[in-house]
Amino acid sequence: EKEQILLDEEAIRRALTRISHEMIEKNKGMDDCILLGIRTRGYPLAEQLAVNIKRIEGIELPVGSIDITLYRDDLEKKQSDPKIHDLELPASIEGKKVILVDDVLYTGRTVRAAMDALMDKGRPNQIQLAVLVDRGHRELPIRPDYVGKNVPTSRSEQIRVQLHQSDATDKVSIVQT
Ligand code: 5GP
Ligand code: MG
């Protein structure tokens, strides 16, 4: 296995700080915004963004989580629909701006499922998307509003995301599997 480091701890911290500033600028403050982390690793990222925004802007954003599993049939190169296991909303999303947060954006199917689940719960004013890594290969017309790092990948490569909340270290690398 070949592993190449893309972002170390400092680089992740800086990327999240930059994204926090971009969010504040785009939303002209953060009134009526809710962060929604896609589990597993989108959730600690959403929590860190909330900490940053509190520090920079003095506003405490509600943070929720959504748990989605994708079933991929690699043999047939066919993907079935993602399944929503759990949606924890910290507040009503009616008329709010919901910012989805995930570690890696790939085909876009997970984000699409998250948007479907959200719109079953109410009518948000807007949905935005923040990802730590965009690895390309989109199959849907979905693009992130905030990106930590764009990483062109081949399908045989994998992005390994390690965050101290779950992995005892903060590191993003690319591995050839
Ligand atoms: P998509 O639904 O866009 O195809 O895939 C995005 C979801 O699958 C995200 O929740 C992400 O965590 C996971 N994912 C897809 N590709 C990768 C990858 O290369 N590395 C990691 N760590 N997660 C991935
Ligand atoms: Mg995921």
Image (cartoon, rainbow, N blue to C red):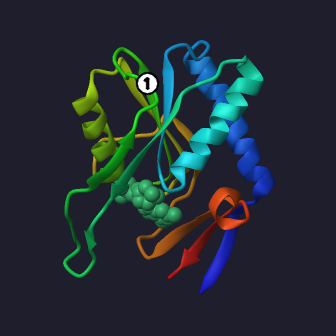
Asked whether, in this view, residue 53 is left or right of residue 46, the answer is right
Asked whether, in this view, residue 130 is left or right of residue 77, the answer is right
Picture layout, residue 99 above or below residue 104 = above
| Location of residue 136 by image quarter | bottom left
The answer to whether mark 1 is within 8 Å of ligand 1 is no
Badge 1 amino acid: Ala
Residue at left 22%, top 32%? 120
Count of all numbered marks drawn on residues in the image: 1
The one nearer the camera, 148 or 112, is 112
Query: Would residue 148 be visible to someone looking at this image?
Result: no
Residue at left 59%, top 87%? 1
* Whole-percent x, y for residue 127 in the image: 39, 28
Query: Would residue 124 be visible to someone looking at this image?
Result: yes
Picture layout, residue 43 above or below residue 116 = below
Residue at left 28%, top 21%? 123
Picture layout, residue 94 above or below residue 12 = above
* Whole-percent x, y for residue 20 in the image: 66, 31
* Whole-percent x, y for residue 163 in the image: 66, 59
* Whole-percent x, y for residue 154 in the image: 45, 70
Q: Which residue is mark 1?
A: 91
Q: Quadrant of ligand 2?
A: bottom left
| Location of residue 70 by image quarter | bottom left
Q: Residues within 10 Å of mark 1 (few under 14, many from 20)?
A: few
Picture layout, residue 158 above or below residue 151 = below
The one nearer the camera, 143 or 114, is 114
Residue at left 60%, top 46%? 45
Q: Residue furthest bottom?
A: 1
Helix or strand or loop: what does disc 1 sit on?
Answer: loop
The one nearer the camera, 79 or 143, is 79
